[in-house]
Amino acid sequence: MNRIKIAVIGASGYSGIELLRILVRHPGAELVAVTSRQFAGKSLETVFPRFRACGPEAKLLFIAPDMDAVAATGAQVAFLALPHGVASEFAIGLLERGLKVIDLSADFRLDDPAVYEEFYDHPHPAPELLKEAVYGLPEVHGAAIAKARLIASPGCYPTSILMPLIPLLKAGIIDPTSI
């Protein structure tokens, strides 16, 4: 199995740490870059001792979130474990450098810039990318996700609602106006 080279931008926050926990044990993932301004230069196992037993990736050093440095690691996919409003700036730079981007924030979940501004009280920093982003619910958009350059990871609340509703809507069991 070819392992996919992965970078995690914002690897020291809650979402980043949870993502690392999954990735370091995944046989198809090779962690090649982890970023953190606070921990740049320190190893993953030094900052988070729980990763000591996870093989050679535990020795990986955090780097500053510089997109040229991330691209130089050979990463093919970058996960953005950053707050909304910040992630889109990194998405632009990573996409320009040819990486596939999976955004864990809310920056690309809405495809309409006006709706984004209504919810988040500021204009979207990369409105040209909103139509390109694929909503990352694999049960619904699996084929599109496989081809996408930019994937908007759905949040836990929407996923918990969408998963039971979509089959009911498709079967015509419930009226969409009743939701």
Image: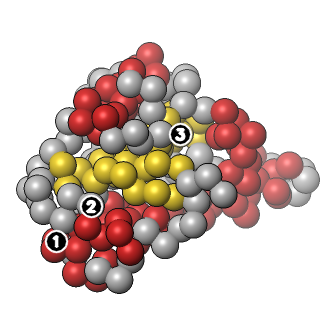
The residue drawn where x is 30% and y is 70% is: 58
User: Seen in the image, is 163 located left or right of residue 28?
Assistant: right
Q: Amino acid at mark 1?
A: Val
Is residue 18 in view from this perspective? no
Looking at the picture, how far across and down is residue 138, in whole percent? 68, 51
The answer to which image quadrant residue 24 occupies is bottom left
Q: Amino acid at mark 3?
A: Ile
Mark 3 Cα within 10 Å, few/some/many (few <14, many 20+)?
many
Looking at the picture, how far across and down is residue 11, in whole percent? 28, 57
Mark 2 Cα within 10 Å, few/some/many (few <14, many 20+)?
some
Residue under numbered circle 2: 60
Q: Is residue 104 above or below residue 97?
A: below
Say if mark 2 contacts mark 1, CB within 8 Å. Answer: no
Residue under numbered circle 1: 47
Is residue 146 in view from this perspective? yes
Q: Amino acid at mark 2?
A: Leu
**Quadrant, the N terminus:** bottom right
Q: Is residue 174 above or below residue 80?
A: below
Looking at the picture, how far across and down is residue 77, in whole percent? 47, 42
The residue drawn where x is 35% and y is 83% is: 53
Q: Which mark is residue 151?
A: 3
**Cα distance, mark 2 to mark 1?**
11 Å
Looking at marks 3 and 2 on the same chain, the residue that comes earlier in the sequence is marked by 2
Say if mark 3 contacts mark 2, CB within 8 Å. Answer: no
